[in-house]
Amino acid sequence: MIEVKNLTKDYGQLRAVDNISFTIPQGEIVGFLGPNGAGKTTTLKIMTCFMPPNAGNVYIDDLNIYQNSIQIRKKIGYLPEGCPLYGEMNVIDFLKFVAELRDIEKASIHKRIKEMIQTCGLKDVVHQEIGELSKGFRQRVGLAGAMIHNPEILILDEPTSGLDPNQIAEIRALIKQLGREKTVLISTHILREVEATCDRVIIIDKGKIVADGPLAEIQNSFHNQNRVYFEIKADTHMLIDEFESLPNIDSIQLYSKENSLYKFYVNFSKDKDIRPDLYNFIKSKEWILFEMRAEQRSLEDIFRQLTEKVEDNE
Ligand SMILES: Nc1ncnc2c1ncn2[C@@H]1O[C@H](COP(=O)(O)OP(=O)(O)O)[C@@H](O)[C@H]1O
Ligand SMILES: [Mg+2]
């Protein structure tokens, strides 16, 4: 069991990770989803003892990152972002090198390497230089290296980024297969990655956890909501608060603003279509309605809403 508790990390003035907490029971495949810059890599580096947090702790069973970093590293296989490898080494030498770094007993190194070649489908490339391999194969070599010490936990930072669609499918299948035996945490900014491989998703945005649960559950919690998109032209300084006086609106977001053209999303419960009220309200204010349309929520929308950035071009 992994427990991340009240983790905070600052880079100078920037709070990259802001008091986040989550737990991952043994055997789960969890997606750590968020837009670029959300704080995923920072969190994973702290969990893998590459960097200390400013506050909070990470527990792996009865170990914690302050007192047991060496034991924790033994339990974790970590594939960093971009997967840095030694391009001039051939695959087998690289795996030997990593096995020695990991202090694997001499007698079992050969067996472990053989297993990794088998698991990660590297049989045909063992004598090739890593630098000459396709990105998909390089990622498999990275995975083999990350797992050489047979860790219980795999932490993969954007494992399919930069791969072509075939390679993505292959790596995802491999991760799913590995997930049968291990606890896996995969960071990604791509929703489809989570849909394809994970049981559960933790969504992070601007250093904060904004959702955590099974994908279907997150989707369901938005299921009873509908959404209307609308654009208005308003000469006065428009205040988003003015809409909040309308009944039956769950939330409203300013999506963009250019000069006096405002674009909004409003969420409302399914029972009541708010479009007539919304229209009458806009009319009473003498704002000009440019567009209004109802939208069904896809998971993509939900993710966007959870991680939405309001552009303020003023
Ligand atoms: N070494 C660093 N020094 C200063 N700022 C950093 C450093 N690493 C990351 N950041 C900043 O911290 C925030 C979170 O980054 P990161 O954890 O890499 O996010 P993600 O992996 O979700 O894209 C970003 O704003 C990023 O620019
Ligand atoms: Mg990252």
Image: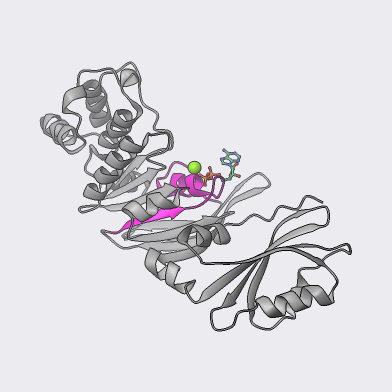
Residues 230 and 159: in front is: 230
Image: 221 above or below 146? below
In magenta segment, residue 46: yes
Where is the N terminus found, in terms of image quarters?
bottom left
Q: In this view, does 245 lie to the left or right of 45?
A: right
Image: 295 above or below 159? below
Residues 41 and 300: in front is: 300
Image: 110 above or below 158? above
Q: Where is residue 130 in the image (x, y as percent from the top left)?
A: 31, 21
Tell me what residue is drawn at x 24 percent, y 18 percent: 128
Tell me what residue is drawn at x 43 percent, y 63 percent: 22
Please name the colour scheme applied to the rendered image: one colour
Q: What stretch is highlighted in magenta?
A: 28-53
Q: Position of residue 275 (x, y in %)?
A: 66, 76
In magenta segment, residue 237: no
Q: Quadrant of residue 103?
A: top left
Tell me what residue is drawn at x 35 percent, y 46 percent: 155
Residue 82 visible at all: yes
Q: In which quarter of the image is residue 97?
A: top left
Q: Where is residue 3 in the image (x, y as percent from the top left)?
A: 39, 61
Residues 12 and 25: in front is: 25
Q: In this view, does 238 lie to the left or right of 304?
A: right
Residue 7 visible at all: no
Quadrant of the displayed image that contains ligand 1: top right
Q: Position of residue 81 (x, y in %)?
A: 43, 37
